[in-house]
Amino acid sequence: MFRALVVFALLVAVHAGRSPNADILEELLGDLNGRFSDNVEEDARLDVPDLVTKYGYNLEEHTVVTPDGYILGMHRIPHGRDNNNFPGDKPVIFLMHGLLGSSADYVLMGPGSGLAYILAEEGFDVWMGNARGNYYSRKHLRLRPDALLNTDFWDFSWDEIGNIDLPSMIDHVLAYTGRSKLHYIGFSQGTTSFFVMTSLRPEYNEKIISMHALAPVAYMAHNKNLLFNALAPFSKSLTSLVALIGIGEFLPNRLIYTWAGQALCRDEAVLQPVCSSILFLIAGWNENQHNATMLPVIFGHTPAGASVRQLAHYGQGIADKHFRRYDFGRTQNRRRYGSRTPPSYDLGKITTPVFLHYSDNDPLAHVNDVFRLFNELANPVGLFRVQQATFSHLDFLYGIDVKKLVYDRVINLIRTMDDLGV
Ligand SMILES: *[C@@H]1O[C@H](CO)[C@@H](O)[C@H](O)[C@H]1NC(C)=O
């Protein structure tokens, strides 16, 4: 309905202005058709390959097997649809999602708003990773995610995602494209896992031209998130409890969420404000960046699954105010790390040029924690505050003005870094 009105208004405007110009009209309509979701219910149900193909983009699926047997699904949009719509030798950008997210986070808002589409139109070869345990990477050579009697599949936190998954996926991308380096953009846990990778395996700094951290999360001492803060005191006992009762997975993506998203959160629903406040409470979302019409699509793809240990690891960071490896308890720590307490991630080893993009109102990436991170990195290049006081965590993915406020700057920085030919 709303779209029809806009189309009508545009038609009137074009007609009123001057003699109808078919090209301009087509361009306006084309742009309008391409920018938003054209069917919210459908987009909630489609998985990434079908969703991206539906909007007229090429999508490649890639499979990467990690040294410890996880089978990861990657997605690639090799070129644009409207601009730069030819295959070719383009700079490679690797996108990594956040906690409970997946590659869907970068496309579900539709062309014109989803970061992956925007980058493809700007002339980049776009690759999206999926961490072990999420909807696209819920497979293993031997272990089964749904095994009833053991939770071995789920024995990982974002330490393993950074230490094992990211290097495996990045090596695949470089080998496949024949390049020696790429640009990296991460959101939230997608930044945490990057810092893990480049501190534990510093040789990977050589493979990254530039790193752009959206809502960077390393230190969590000032975290204001209700869920995490409620969990933090229990983070140690939480994992043992979970191991005991045999649930290793937290909020898997099941049809129920898609259904709930559609029934409860769609535009006409009385409960839509409830859906908004759930997202607001859990992940920080502010009123004026928030497009409620898209809630069913967001809930259709998120939460995409994670291990309980990923949450517990963040909980430990809040409780002990360090950015360090997973705390297994004294005995196991000694066996694994050779010390009673887990070692800190050495940020001084991260020599990649890093750009941090943060906002004042982000409860998960608090300003003080971001500054501390910036000061400890070996090669921090830029620290950018989003120029809107209310901008919050999820707005980096789903905000109405995120392109103008964040993505355009990131793209300029990537072009500059690429031209420097590092
Ligand atoms: C919100 O999303 C709907 C569906 O994709 C779209 O039609 C609408 O224009 C969007 N609103 C804004 C302000 O971006």
Image: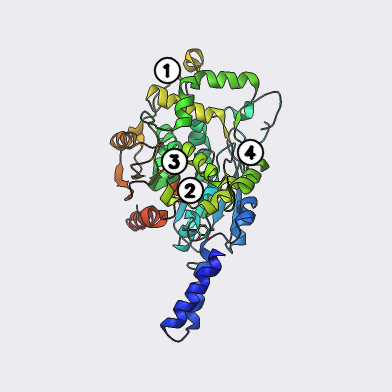
Q: Position of residue 138 (x, y in %)?
A: 63, 38
Query: Which quadrant of the structure image shows residue 140?
Result: top right
* Residue assigned mark 3: 284
Q: Using the numbered discs, state the Cα–Cα distance from disc 2 to disc 3 in whole angstroms.
A: 21 Å
**Is 85 located above or below residue 19 in the figure?**
above
Mark 4 or mark 2, earlier in chain: 2
* Residue assigned mark 1: 341
Query: Which quadrant of the structure image shows residue 17?
Result: bottom left
Mark 1 or mark 4, earlier in chain: 4
Mark in front: 2 vs 3: 3
Q: Using the numbered discs, state the Cα–Cα distance from disc 4 to disc 3 in whole angstroms.
A: 27 Å
Q: Position of residue 34 (x, y in %)?
A: 53, 65
Query: In the picture, which quadrant includes the N terminus?
Result: bottom right
- Label 2: which secondary element: strand
Q: Are marks 4 and 3 in contact (CB under 8 Å)?
A: no
Horizontally, residue 343 falls left or right of residue 367, namely: right
Mark in front: 4 vs 3: 3
Q: Using the numbered discs, state the Cα–Cα distance from disc 1 to disc 4 in whole angstroms.
A: 31 Å
* Residue assigned mark 4: 138
**Is 217 located above or below residue 335 in the figure?**
below
Name the residue rendered at 36%, 37% in the picture.
350
Q: Using the numbered discs, state the Cα–Cα distance from disc 4 to disc 2 in whole angstroms.
A: 19 Å
Q: Amino acid at mark 3?
A: Gly
Q: Amino acid at mark 1?
A: Thr
Which of 102 and 13 lies nearest the eye of the viewer? 13
* Residue assigned mark 2: 95
Return the residue found at the far right: 148
Name the residue rendered at 69%, 32% in the picture.
146
How crowded is the residue under tag 4: few (<14 C-alpha within 10 Å), some, or many (20+)? many
